[in-house]
Image (cartoon, grey):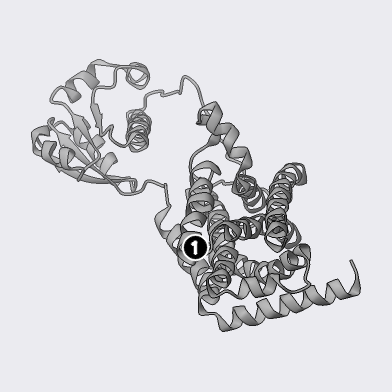
Amino acid sequence: MTALAVRRMAAITIKESLQILRDPSSILIGFILPVFLTLLSGYSTNLDITDLSIGLVLEDGSPEARSLAAAFTATTSFSVHAGRDRREFLDDMAMGRIRGLVVIPQTFGRDLSRMGAADAKSADVPFQVIADGSEPNTATFLQNYAQGVWLSWMEIRAQQNGEAFTQLVEVAPRTWFNQELLSLNSLLPGGMAINLTLIGALLTALVVAREWERGTMEALLATPIGPLELLVGKLLPYFVLGLAALGICLLLTLAVFHVPYRGSALALVAVSSVFLISALALGLFISTAAKNQFVASQIAILSAFLPAYFLSGYVFEPSGMPLPVRLLTHVIAAKYYVSCLKTLFLAGDAWPLLWPNIGGMAAIAAVLLALTLTKTRRRIA
């Protein structure tokens, strides 16, 4: 590259930087949108189930039945509404005000006295759990947690009665990387990738589309500047703005939502830089096809945000998707970035995992830049 080419590229970079400072929409996308999206993600995408509303039907008045009912009431995972007849809760179940019923039948105390501790813990549980299947995850949680409350109550009861109570299989669970099993620790790093996808695409798509609307792009293309110089000169200021948006997202994630970060700053900047280039390149490519801001914003949402949200593994695991859709996920840059961010936040600098993802993002960025360069050359010609 000649010195003159560098000067032309620097001139475009300075011109774009001044344009960013004068343009309120760039400030809005670069600084306000990351705050809004991060807070929205943090407060709305929490999959942890706490204080689940259930109905507790206590049909039996025996001390054992009341003791088991007290065990359900004491847990913080359930918000228990007690009653004597299951018919009291039918409307609440139908309206979704409660997510299930725990029914302790009239025969509970009598059946329990007939069974030894070993029988009760293993098979015929003498109470009923009715779960709302319209939300399968919540229903599974209710059934499993009710089983856990039952086993804990049986163990405490056996100890109080001086009986032996041994588990048929003793499970010693160990959780790596996210010991508290908080969904926020996994979702918010993925949410950063989705936010930066939208911000990066909008930054370049809208601003360049505005130039097409005002006619300044044609004037720029009439100058001696080359397509590559124009492309790099336009990308650099928005790349810096994208890194600033990343810093805002990271700061809010750490300070407001207390998500732990175990990787290094160098690794985060490296993977984010490659991803930002792909997101900005997508915006530039959109801007070559759309010559007004409304169309550019619509295309950016359809081609960047929605595929990133549904196909990146942010919420929905790609391994559970049909094969054609699973193959499609490999051309979504956010898929690789989500994997990188989850690795950096939860495990640290695991470079054997990071390098393939960096390679995937770099390949997508190279293809998008090549397409944009080719289309820009045609316009100049």
In percent of width and height, residue 288 lies at: 61, 59
Task: Provide the secondary structure element on which disc 1 rests.
Answer: helix
Say few, some or many: other residues with alpha carbon within 10 Å of mark 1 (under 14 / 14 to 19 / 20 or more): many
Check disc 1 and report the residue beneath it. 38
Q: Position of residue 221 (x, y in %)?
A: 69, 70
Is 366 displayed left or right of 320 in the figure?
right
Give residue 323's position: percent from left, percent from top: 55, 27
Displayed quadrant of residue 63: top left
x and y, in percent, of residue 114 in the image:
23, 15
Residue at x 43%, y 61% (from the top left corner): 40
Callout 1, which amino acid? Thr
- The image quadrant where one finds the C terminus is bottom right
- Give the residue drawn at x 10%, y 36%: 84
Picture residue at 77% right of the left edge, 62% below the top:
228
Specify whether residue 348 is in view.
no
Depth check: 26 or 70 in front? 26
Camera-nearest residue between 64 and 260? 260
Image quadrant in which you'd find residue 248: bottom right
Which of 215 and 27 lies nearest the eye of the viewer? 215
- In the rendered image of this protein, does residue 223 appear above or below residue 167? below
Is 347 situated above or below 149?
below
Whether residue 193 is visible: yes
Question: Residue extending furthest front?
Answer: 381
Q: Residue 222 is drawn in which quadrant?
A: bottom right
Most foreground residue, 269 or 49:
269
Which quadrant is home to the N terminus?
bottom right
94 left or right of 268? Answer: left
Position of residue 25 relative to residue 327, above or below, is: below
